[in-house]
Amino acid sequence: MAGTPGACVNPGAALRTLTTDLVAVSPARLALSFGLLLAAGLTEGASLLVFVPALQLLQNAGTENARLAHALASVGLAYELGPVLLLCVALIAARAVLVYAKSRSAARLHFGFADHVRLRLYNALSEARWSHTRTLRTADLEELLTAGIERIQSAVWALIMLAQTAVLATVYLVLSAFASPTLTALVGTAGVALALALRGHRRSVVLLGKGLHDDRLACFRELSTLVHGLKVAKSFGTETAHGEHFAHAVSATRTGYMRYADLTAQSGLWLQLAAGALLAGAVYVGARHLQLDLPTLLVLVFCVARLAPYLGQLQTLSQQLLFALPTWEQARALETQLTNAREPPPLSGQRFTLSRALVLESVSVRYPTGTTAALDKVSICLPAGSFTALVGPSGAGKSTLADILLGLITADSGTVRVDEQLLTTDLTRAWRGFVGYVPQETFLLPDTVRANLLLGDPGANDGALWQALDAASASEFVRALPRGLDSPVGERGTLLSGGERQRLALARALLRKPLLLVLDEATSSLDADNQDRIGRALANLRGRMTILLIAHRSALVELADQTVVLQAGRVSDVLKQTPLKLPSGITVPS
């Protein structure tokens, strides 16, 4: 992704930002989840503590537990095996309900956080300056906003489960300490030593996550390239070559995931072996050296047996979290870039009029990656209601000039005036609401004709839709469609011809009732008949709005009131087909 750092993750810093964001986004939900988790752990511990007196009562051994006897007496129950077992069942049932509530709360927490991050990234992308977003790779953005967010979601889930497992492990350590502090200390020391021994696996997972970040992107890029260029690939017979590149990317990704699975399996193997040895050692030490009675020893064995899987879960979850952190860091870096490139918010109620002229004076634009200026002191005048053609070879600066007029980018120097209103950076977003745009590559939703038209004006009624279609010479073909306005256009408009797509795009732009209509190479690939249809539509619009046609070559240029010729970012000539009537006080910049 151009302008986005690679996956050079700092695990500690990334984990801190992930935790901080999670707390900031859902503090109440987080508090509820951990409150339920703590309550579930305490009820589980309490049920085990009650289980020891139950075993003692079963053996008719040991002294009466005064606290438990008092608690039972307070509700009218005797200190006997039946009531004690009933209390155990009640505590287990309470834990089950708490675990169910905790699971639902945790699910809402991590799904909600993932959606929040996705929407935050989407909003940052949509609000960033076009001059910045145009440098980003589309495939990388699509991958991050889809599969990438799912990996972030898995990281949040792993973080929540880590906290849960740590809490439950602590509960069992405390219970074990009540039964035998000495044995608990030995088990705890062994667990810490095991975690330190496996830290090499965790470091390997971090490095693996970094490598897989690039492999996944390569795989997604190859797939995106083929999908968007499938027609060209088939016509050139290059499907096999694309397939080989894609297969290589898939193989690299699979290798990384297999390595991750192998590391996880290795950790599980060592943990299971260690757990077995730890359990056997705890039984031996408790029975032979600490002379613990059978009920106490059984509780200790149960605690150690439950602790061993938790140690495995802690290792597995930590690896899963570390594995996904590079994606989180990438998302944070991208969001920071986009936020820094954010456009000023549109001014509320800002209005424009174009009754005199749209004037560019000494406008210059230089892109950071360019060696020469894209526009160099360009000065032109578009009188209100006139039809101007902008022509020149590829690379002359035509599209950059269109971006200036559309308010997508601002000039490094020079001025743009709409009548007497200076078009400053803080006004560009408002100005775009008064401009209609028809690009060379028509963008259509995979939806109906109606849905695509309503992009221009979501509140338009059918009468306004047909009026715009009439003005674009498109109503005839739409009426001939099986379902009229509700006919599907297909993926990227494939159910329509090229000319029909362009006329539909023109109707969508006209639905906005723009002050300025910009057609950027919109007729370059059309046949003579479709060019003639669009030409008639533009001729009828002359005088009703200001029109700028950007073309490399087109028969429609002959319709223009004036033709501006660009060469290497400069105006080389201005040809007037008809005498331009300039408003009083307006002159054509030299």
Image: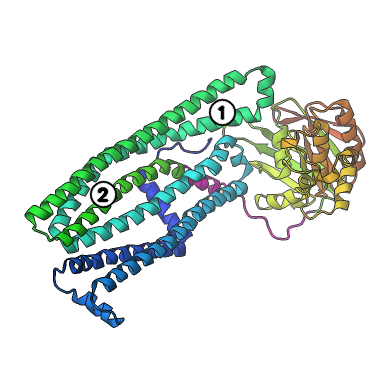
| Residue at the spot 26% in from the left edge and 49% down from the top edge | 308
Is residue 203 depicted above or below 585 in this figure?
above
Q: Quadrant of residue 383?
A: top right
Q: Residues within 10 Å of mark 1 (few under 14, many from 20)?
A: many
Counting from the top left corner in percent of width and height, residue 318 is at 34, 46
Counting from the top left corner in percent of width and height, residue 344 is at 62, 53
- On screen, residue 194 versus residue 563, left or right, reads left
Counting from the top left corner in percent of width and height, residue 488 is at 78, 41
Q: Amino acid at mark 2?
A: Ala
Magenta segment: does it hold 342?
A: yes
Counting from the top left corner in percent of width and height, residue 466 is at 88, 47
Q: Which residues are magenta?
A: 330-352
Q: Amino acid at mark 1?
A: Glu
Q: Residue furthest top?
A: 237
Judging by the rendered image, the residue that carries numbered circle 2 is 308
| Residue at the spot 53% in from the left edge and 35% down from the top edge | 2
Q: Residues within 10 Å of mark 2 (few under 14, many from 20)?
A: many
Q: Quadrant of residue 367?
A: top right
Judging by the rendered image, the residue that carries numbered circle 1 is 222
Q: From where the camera sits, is residue 419 visible?
A: yes
* Number of the label disc, if any, that sits on residue 483: none
Q: Nearer the viewer, mark 1 or mark 2?
A: 2
Q: From where the camera sits, is residue 560 visible?
A: no
Magenta segment: does it hold 524?
A: no
- Display colour scheme: rainbow
Along the polypeptide, which appears first: circle 1 or circle 2?
1
Is residue 533 depicted above or below 243 in this figure?
below
- Of residue 486 and residue 458, the one placed in the foreground of this image is 486
- On screen, residue 38 versus residue 560, left or right, reads left
